[in-house]
Image: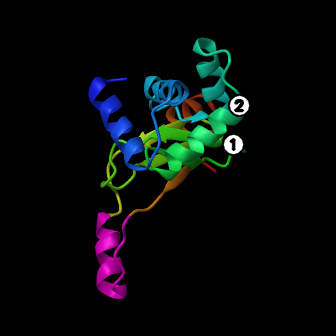
Amino acid sequence: MMAGENIQFREQLKKKGYKMTTQRQAILDVILQHEGEHLSTEEIYELVKKEHPDIGLATVYRTLLLLDDMELIYKLDFDDGCNRYELNRHKDDHRHHHLICTQCGGVEEVEEDLLESLEEQILKNYGFIVLNHRVKFYGYCKKCSENSPKKAGQD
């Protein structure tokens, strides 16, 4: 973990009355080292356990819940039966969108905010200020659509 991020996380925890324990640090380190992989609780547990064999699964669950409540990480649901997590690098920005392959289960991130004009229209028509949104697109990734005997999009 970069020193600046480590200090930032420590300060955010301290503001809320928590300490950066060795276990919390190890969990954050794993999430950072595997950024973009959208790890499940169990995957994080297995990776942390390699360096800290005494850590318990319940500790990982509690820590992920705390980090999510503090918005240091995001809990994601890709409809695959488990929660997944990613680091929250942009507290004030909109979240990115996800492309979820229904064949291989792969997940890609779309960094562009594709809904700015829709948000403006919502504000204009309804007086509703959108603070954030989540969008998941389901379909076939490039690899699966190329390897499929029936090309995606063809009937």
Name the kind of residue labelled 2 in the image.
Leu
Q: Mark on residue 57?
A: 2
- Other residues around mark 1 within 10 Å, as few (<14) / some (14–19) / many (≥20): few
Would residue 99 be found to the left or right of residue 121 on screen? right
Residue beneath the point at 67% across and 49% down: 79
Q: Which mark is first along the chain, 2 or 1?
A: 2
Q: Secondary structure at mark 2?
A: helix
Residue wearing tag 1: 82
Q: CA distance from mark 1 to mark 2?
A: 15 Å
User: Would you say the residues marked 1 and 2 are in contact, meaning their CB atoms lie under 8 Å apart?
Assistant: no
Q: Position of residue 93 (x, y in %)?
A: 31, 54
Main SS of the magenta part reads helix
Q: Tell me residue 75's x, y (percent).
A: 55, 47
**Quarter of image, res 140:** top right
Is 128 a magenta residue? yes
The relative height of residue 130 versus residue 111 in the rendered view (above or below) is: below
Nearer the observer, disc 1 or disc 2?
2
Location of residue 50 in the rendering, given as x and y in whole percent from the top left corner = 62, 13
> Per the image, is 132 magenta?
no
Q: Please name whichever residue, 117 or 140, is drawn nearer the observer in this view of the structure.
A: 117
Q: Is residue 57 left or right of residue 84?
A: right
Q: Residue at x 65, y 34 (%)?
A: 59
Residue at 51%, 52% (x, y): give it: 69
Q: Name above or below for residue 95 compared with residue 104.
A: below
Under circle 1, the secondary element is loop
Residue 85 is left or right of residue 102, and the answer is left
* Label 2 crowd (10 A; few <14 / some 14-19 / many >=20): some
Say the numbered circle drawn on residue 4.
none
What amino acid is found at the position of numbered circle 1 in the picture?
Cys
Q: Is residue 7 visible?
A: yes
Q: Which residues are magenta?
A: 116-131
